[in-house]
Image: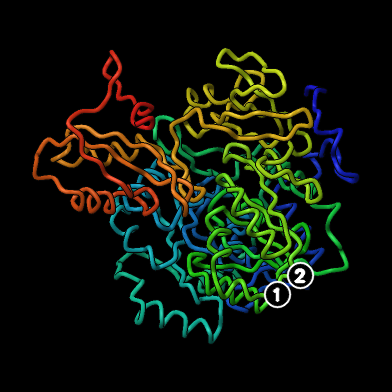
Amino acid sequence: MSTERPWLNIYPGGIPANIDPSAYQSVVDFVSKKCEEHKKKPAFSLMGTELTYGEIEKLSTQFGAYLQSRGLERGDKFAIMMPNLPQYPIALIGALKAGLIVVNTNPLYTPREMEHQFTDSDVKGIVIAENFAANLEKILPKTNIKVIITTTIGEMLGLKGSMVNFAVKNLKRMVPKFELPNTVEFKAALKQGKSFKLADIPRNPEDVIVHQYTGGTTGVSKGAMLTNRNLVANLLQIRAFLDPYVDKSKETIVLAPLPLYHIFAFTCNCLAMMDLGALSVLVVNPRDLSTVVKEFTRYKITGLTGVNTLYNALNNNEDFKKLDFSHLEFASAGGTALQSAVANDWKILTGNLIGEGYGMTEASPVITSSPRDIIKLGTVGIPVPSTNVRIVSDDGEVMPIGERGEIQVQGPQVMKGYYNRPEETANTITADGWLNTGDIGIMDESGYLRIVDRKKDMILVSGFNVYPNEIEDVISMHPKVLEVAAIGVPDDKSGEVVKVFIVKSDKSLKEDEVIAHCKENLTGYKVPKQIEFKDDLPKSNVGKILRRELRDM
């Protein structure tokens, strides 16, 4: 690794230049040690119901034993599809203990999106919140899924859970009817798992343990293969940046409003907080700000992770403004650019700066972060230990300090590659191990990184990647559409929203028809918020639609 790492000169005391990724053989090794170390402490809570680290260890072992008893073998893919529930860490750790490869799945995916992910990864088993099971029913025959475990939002909440489930099913009508073969309920799986002994699985640092799906410039969703070493390295890198600021004599209570299936919360909340013996307070639906306010009144929250849109919403929520923030020590932002106005309003309201970071699914995800006492607004911080970051020109030449270019990353957290896509892997990771991020940035003389643009046409909606080709492919399926182009346009609430330009093949086409078609085939945040009909679209001399000209317009 290059010795030219100017950020090391400003590393706060206690943060090492490098970490040792071999400190733990596997993520299971890491988790088991932390669960033993903190076994009596509460680990996860939902609506006030808590599970201790000891209970997480015991229940995940039962779950892993159950999965093995159903014939799932080492290396089989296992999907987890649910919002933030205590079942999530149990299922995640249990699947890893069973030797399976976890496929995190957005529960809001449409059947089309589910089918692609499950067939591309060859998923053999799934645990799914019953709210979304009707969509699985539609595509199940096209997959190789044999083991289906269903769960409910209130399943692990005792008596309170019965009331929650009644409300979800009967009052809010959030559970469409479904019929799936050979399903078993989550708690029944745990109970049956007690009867089996978890078979010992060899664990190697280079074993792929997660397929974390991302998009690409082609619009095809790809499974980033993350290994034990990748994730262990990133957990140690996160800990290195936290260690100097953690008072071990105090309880760390971290709000987890971001979905655990997303790589940011997956690593930073679900796994990294175990290192501290922190209590992670789960929020099922962060759009319902009343639940966030409720958790702040229930617990003395010391930290939280979020995206710009969440912080902006909280800044403007009257009930949130009335809360006591004296226990709040840190707030972290990622996934999308943090707006200066939002950061400033948060500082005025809570007395805390928001530390911004930068990451990618392909880097497990953390690349840079802001040490708590040297936050520089407008930047995404400095590289974490054992990480090299450089700026290169279109020709691959390393650019001098202060010049813009594509950000490249090198470190132990960089993925093994994309599953079954060697060509895309070769285009993304250079022969000497540098990850091409596709993002344009500038690094200053101290090593602070600023993101200024995106090389790819990706649209970033509330921290989620939206790829124009996917939107265009879906809309072009409509019989009344001749041509379509999708771009991102600025939005105060979500950073960007999708705007599409359409040339009609049938003059009767209306906006609401396009929206209805998109809602059938796309997750909500991908559905266009703006539609403009045009007589023609700008094209290059070879007929390629020029999105840049549409953006310039």
Where disc 1 sits, the SS reads loop
Mark identifier at residue 211: none
Q: Position of residue 334 (x, y in %)?
A: 61, 48
Q: Which residue is mark 2?
A: 327
Asked if residue 69 lies left or right of residue 546, the reply is: right
For the C terminus, give its image quadrant: top left
Classify 10 Å Cα crowding around label 1: few (below 14), some (14-19), many (20 and above): few
Give the mark toward the camera: 2 or 1: 1
Vertical comparison of 430 with 202: above or below? above
Q: Quadrant of residue 360?
A: top right
The residue wearing badge 1 is 324
- Discs 2, 1 touching: Cβ within 8 Å: yes
- Please determine whether, in this image, residue 63 is positioned above or below residue 342: below
Using residue 534 as the reference point, say whether residue 307 is left or right of it.
Answer: right
Task: Give the residue type that dot 2 points to.
Answer: His
- For the N terminus, the quadrant is top right
Query: How far across and down, in percent of the image, does residue 430 sit?
Result: 60, 20
Under circle 2, the secondary element is loop
Q: Residue type at mark 1?
A: Asp
Residue 532 position (above or below residue 522) = above
- Where is residue 65 shown, x and y percent of the image? 59, 62
| Front in this rendered view, residue 415 or 12 | 12
Residue depicted at 51% across the width and 76% down the height: 155
Name the residue rendered at 46%, 72% in the picture.
152
Q: CA distance from mark 2 to mark 1?
A: 8 Å
Q: From the viewer's side, name the closer residue of 85 and 291.
A: 291
